Image (cartoon, rainbow, N blue to C red):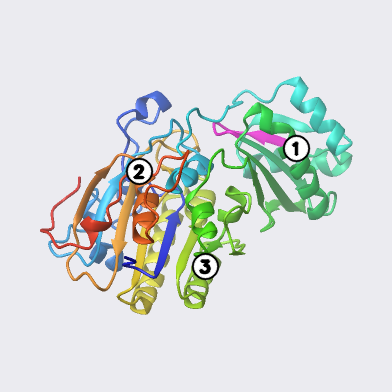
Amino acid sequence: MVRFERIVVMVLDGVGCGALPDANLFSDQGANTLGHIAAAAGPLTLPHLQALGLGNITSIAGVAQSLNPRGSWGKMAERSDAKDSTTGHWEIAGVVMPEPFRVYAQGFPPEIMQAFAHIAGVEALGNIPASGTEIIQTLGPEHVRTGRPIVYTSTDSVFQVAAHEGILPRERLYTICRETRDLLDTFRVGRVIARPFIGNEGTGFERTSGRRDFSMPPPALTLLDLLQQHKIAVHAVGKISDIFCGRGIDKHTSTTSNAEGMQATAEMFAQIERGLVFANLIDFDMNYGHRRDCSGFAAALQQFDTWLGEFLPALENTDLLLLTADHGCDPCMPGSDHTREYVPLLAYTPQVKEGRNLGVRTSFADITATILQNFGLHGKLKGSFSGNSFLDELTSTGTAQSAQ
């Protein structure tokens, strides 16, 4: 029996809630994105998230625990051995990676760079781990003079290509990245990312909204594939379509900011009668976590909370909202990379008047199990890890208590 007709999954990119037990293997011991932002940027004011139970998940200055939260709450551990966006989103959709993507933290080997030069028609600049905003300032002038694209990476499995829009037009950059994607599948690189920018040496360079992600295709069927096969609508917002290579998605809206993502989510939600809206809000990670901007991160959280207060009244008894993340991106930790953390889990439906403690989940894929059970498809995702459903838990009543 279908309990919910419409389900919205919103991924607050990079919004972790405390180090996983194995965080030391990633040099992330002590990470806590939400807790550290609240401590560094002053107490947070997030009344709607607090009402759903966010303060019951981890200690957040300004966000109190709720004895009678409107939502159900918990936190999820990542089962896959990684902390990148692609792996996190795939696991939310039921695919647990048996081995992580390869990381080229010292730069890519000659066989990759030579093949890239053949695709681009010119040798690349860079080929080093770097901050994207910093490397375009350093190598931007030489790129403008020579036309050589800038290649850089990080401790994540990413091959990033930056180019000035006046030197290498967006569509040409996308073509290069798309062809490079095909090359890098055998090298197990998770994503190729196009990073167009504008500006000049005198005033500085800045990235534009033309980012595009080109991911490896998921190695098994996902939640999205299965829903689509059973004629259940799947609408995607933000970089979701890129991460899943467009698979299992009936309609998508690309976005360049949280504001656009929130607006698109509300619009797509209003358009469907039955199905899933799967949305990613990128600003937390891209603009604030990686740039170690605690104040900006805090402001973005408060902006989302304001929007949430406007969105919740639109939900009906047959609607379910799930809020989570794909990894942490603690701006208070050394470096500027993702952090190996639990991710929050908040679930809200107007049909439940008192939330339930969903506890500590052992995989992000519990979201997939819950959605599949809801639509009568539990156990049908063959070859993937479908997790453990919390559907029965969140639709029953219980006593509020901390999940910390």
Disc 1 or 2, which lies upstream in sequence?
1
Q: Nearer the viewer, mark 1 or mark 3?
A: 1
- Residue hosting label 1: 180
Q: Amino acid at mark 3?
A: Ala
**Could you tell whether 95 is left or right of 151 in the image?**
left
Q: Residue furthest left?
A: 399
Disc 3 or 2, which lies upstream in sequence?
3
- Residue hosting label 3: 259
Q: Which mark is residue 387?
A: 2
Say above or below: 251 vs 24. Answer: below
Q: Nearer the viewer, mark 1 or mark 2?
A: 2
Percent across and percent down for residue 100 are: 51, 29
Percent across and percent down for residue 288 are: 49, 51
- Residue at horizontal 43 percent and vertical 43 percent from the top: 327
Percent across and percent down for residue 193 are: 66, 44
Disc 2 packing (10 Å; few <14; some 14–19; many ≥20): many
The quadrant the C terminus occupies is top left
Say above or below: 114 vs 403. Answer: above
Disc 1 packing (10 Å; few <14; some 14–19; many ≥20): many
Disc 3 packing (10 Å; few <14; some 14–19; many ≥20): some
Which of the two residues, 110 or 377, is positioned nearer the viewer here?
377
Residue 153 is one of the magenta-drawn residues:
yes
**Could you tell whether 147 is left or right of 206 in the image?**
right
- Secondary structure state at the residue bearing disc 3: helix
The quadrant the N terminus occupies is bottom left
Q: Which residues are magenta?
A: 151-157
- Residue at horizontal 51 percent and vertical 77 percent from the top: 271
Q: CA distance from mark 1 to mark 3?
A: 31 Å
- Secondary structure state at the residue bearing disc 2: loop
Q: Amino acid at mark 1?
A: Thr
Q: How many marks?
A: 3
